[in-house]
Structure formats: structure tokens, C-alpha cells
Image (spheres, rainbow, N blue to C red):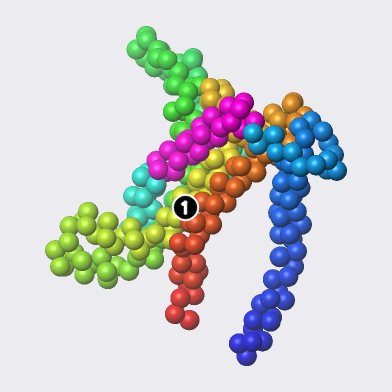
């Protein structure tokens, strides 16, 4: 019976594997091939040329990569700190009110990301919604926070908030209340319970939420363009420019492969630390 189940599971997975091969792996292989072409030469019949990778250091593209990874890391840390209390409340405290919070967060995803970001531009710009009201009430305005690195990080936190919140809530829900109560009965402080029980047992949700937030933020483009005014040029912007205005497909492919490799390494390492059976409720069956 077990062998039959395995055969049926393998057969059932074949259509999905075919879709992944065509829609995911094949395009990545094409990008990898283009990254080894001579720059500005659209032919795969030339000998491999890795000069596009050398441009990452020679032409300073590594700065854009570091900015993207740095802001993604900063936004992920902020998201974790901001989302933990709310996720804990959703998983352990709010009970029926949790559905209200869930709907409120999900509804924001129904509106285009660009529209929401332009809304923040109208709110924070000089003479915008906030500054205009402050000037009307006090007679004095303030400098707009737009077009700066902090506002880009804020926009990343704002956009990817749900991608940290829901996995985190799922991870916290996996923490047994009995373990927390037993620790409290034995005299453990709230901080000790947090660091020795809550965080270790909620680690699968923390890893999944952090990976989702970091991966999406590292490849984000609209935030730096709309709210950041391209104060810093992120790697996604460099890739877009190379493929479009620059017509330098090998360079765009090489930059893409570097970003994909870094993110894939982090994702594989994180997933290896996650107990997927526990997340999907299959442990013990």
C-alpha cells in the first residue's frame, strides 16, 4: 500500500514538475546561457565570455547589489520586530477578532502596489496631505521624508508586511500553551519564555516569513523608484536598464544570475532548517 501511494504521488506530481520545468527552470537556464555571451552580441554560438560578470566589480554594480541586500535585510528585521506582537496576538490572544485583522491586512493586497505607493507620495510630498495640514494648523511646514533611504526601507516594510505577519502567526500558533505555562509555573520570566520557548518553537514560521520578506525586498524595484526617487540605484533597476535601455542582455543576465544565486543559497539554507511536516500538520501521522 505504501509503495502504491508513492507511485500515485509521483504520478500526480508529474504535471506540476513539467510546469516548473517549462515556466521556472527553462527561463533560468536561458538567462544563464545569455550571461556567458559576449556583451552586446546576441548569439549563443560564440565561445563563453564571462566579461559581464567582471563588470559587477569593474563598473561598480556591486554597490547596487549591496544596497538591495542591505535594505532587504533592514526591512526584514524591522518587519519581524513589528509583526511579532501582532502575530502573537492573532495566534494566542485575539481569537475571533483574528479574522477581522486578517481580512483588514488581506484587503490591502487587492489594491495595486504602485497605487498604494503613489498614495504615500501624495501623503508625504511637500505640500501634500500631511505637510499641508500641518502648515494650515501651525503656519510651519517640514521637509518631506521622500527620496531618501529610510523612506525606501519604510516602503519595503509597508508593502511586504503581510508576507511576514501570516507565516509568523502560523509559527507562533505551533507553540504549545502548556510549554509556556509550565515554564511560567517554574519561575521563568517573560523574556526567558520568549527566548527559550517562543522563538525556538516558532522558528519555522520565523524562517518562512523572513525568507519571503527578504527575497521579495531584495528584488523590489517600485519602492526605490516611486518613494525613493532613485536616491540609490537598486540591483533590480540595473537589471531592467541593462535589458531595456542598454540592450546589454549578457550584463542583465549576469546581474540576474548573481542575485538569483545569492537568494537561492539563502533560501535553500533557510528551508533546510524548517520542519515542513510540522508546518503542514503532518508530524506524528
Horizontal side of 92 relative to 31 (left or right) equals left
| Residue that numbered label 1 is attached to | 209
Query: Of helix, strand and loop, which one carries label 1?
Result: helix
Q: Residue furthest bottom?
A: 1
Q: Residue furthest top?
A: 139
Q: Which percent across, then down, holds residue 128?
A: 49, 19
| Residue 26 location (% of width, % of height) | 75, 53
The magenta-colored residue range is 55-79
* Chief secondary structure of the magenta portion: helix
Relative image position of residue 161 (x, y in whole percent): 47, 44
- Is any part of residue 276 visible from this angle? yes
Quadrant occupied by the N terminus? bottom right
Give the class, few, some or many, for how many residues have Cα within 10 Å of label 1's Cα (few <14, many ≥20): many
How far from the left and from the top, in percent, is residue 92? 34, 60
Task: Judge whether 50 appears above or below 225 on screen.
Answer: below
- The part of the image, by quadrant, that contains residue 35 is top right
From the viewer's perspective, tell me whether residue 38 is left or right of residue 127: right
The residue that appears at 62% across and 38% down in the rendered structure is 112
Q: Residue furthest left?
A: 187
Q: Quadrant of residue 63?
A: top right
Q: Nearer the viewer, residue 83 or 221?
A: 221
Amino acid at each position: 500500500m505504501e509503495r502504491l501511494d508513492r507511485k500515485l504521488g509521483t504520478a500526480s506530481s508529474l504535471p506540476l514538475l513539467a510546469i516548473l520545468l517549462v515556466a521556472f527552470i527553462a527561463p533560468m537556464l536561458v538567462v544563464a546561457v545569455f550571461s556567458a555571451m559576449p556583451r552586446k552580441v546576441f548569439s549563443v554560438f560564440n565561445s563563453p565570455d564571462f566579461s559581464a560578470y567582471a563588470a559587477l566589480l569593474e563598473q561598480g554594480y556591486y554597490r547596487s547589489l549591496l544596497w538591495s541586500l542591505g535594505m532587504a535585510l533592514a526591512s526584514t528585521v524591522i518587519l519581524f520586530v513589528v509583526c511579532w506582537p501582532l502575530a502573537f496576538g492573532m495566534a494566542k490572544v485575539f481569537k475571533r477578532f483574528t479574522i477581522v485583522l486578517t481580512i483588514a491586512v488581506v484587503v490591502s493586497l487587492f489594491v495595486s502596489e504602485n497605487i498604494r505607493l503613489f498614495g504615500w507620495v501624495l501623503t508625504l510630498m511637500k505640500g501634500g496631505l500631511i505637510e499641508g495640514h500641518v502648515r494650515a494648523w501651525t503656519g510651519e511646514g517640514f521637509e518631506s521624508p521622500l527620496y531618501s533611504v529610510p523612506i525606501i526601507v519604510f516602503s519595503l516594510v509597508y508593502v511586504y508586511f503581510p508576507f511576514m505577519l501570516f507565516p509568523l502567526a502560523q509559527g507562533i500558533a505551533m507553540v504549545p500553551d502548556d510549554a509556556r505555562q509550565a515554564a511560567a509555573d517554574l519561575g521563568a520570566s517573560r523574556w526567558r519564555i520568549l527566548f527559550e520557548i517562543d522563538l525556538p518553537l516558532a522558528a519555522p514560521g520565523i524562517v518562512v516569513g523572513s525568507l519571503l520578506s527578504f527575497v521579495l525586498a531584495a528584488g523590489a524595484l517600485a519602492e526605490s523608484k516611486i518613494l525613493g526617487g532613485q536616491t540609490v540605484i537598486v540591483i533590480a533597476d540595473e537589471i531592467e536598464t541593462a535589458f531595456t535601455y542598454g540592450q546589454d542582455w549578457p550584463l542583465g543576465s549576469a546581474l540576474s544570475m548573481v542575485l538569483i544565486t545569492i537568494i537561492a543559497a539563502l533560501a535553500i539554507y533557510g528551508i533546510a532548517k524548517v520542519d515542513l511536516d510540522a508546518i503542514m500538520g503532518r508530524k506524528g501521522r
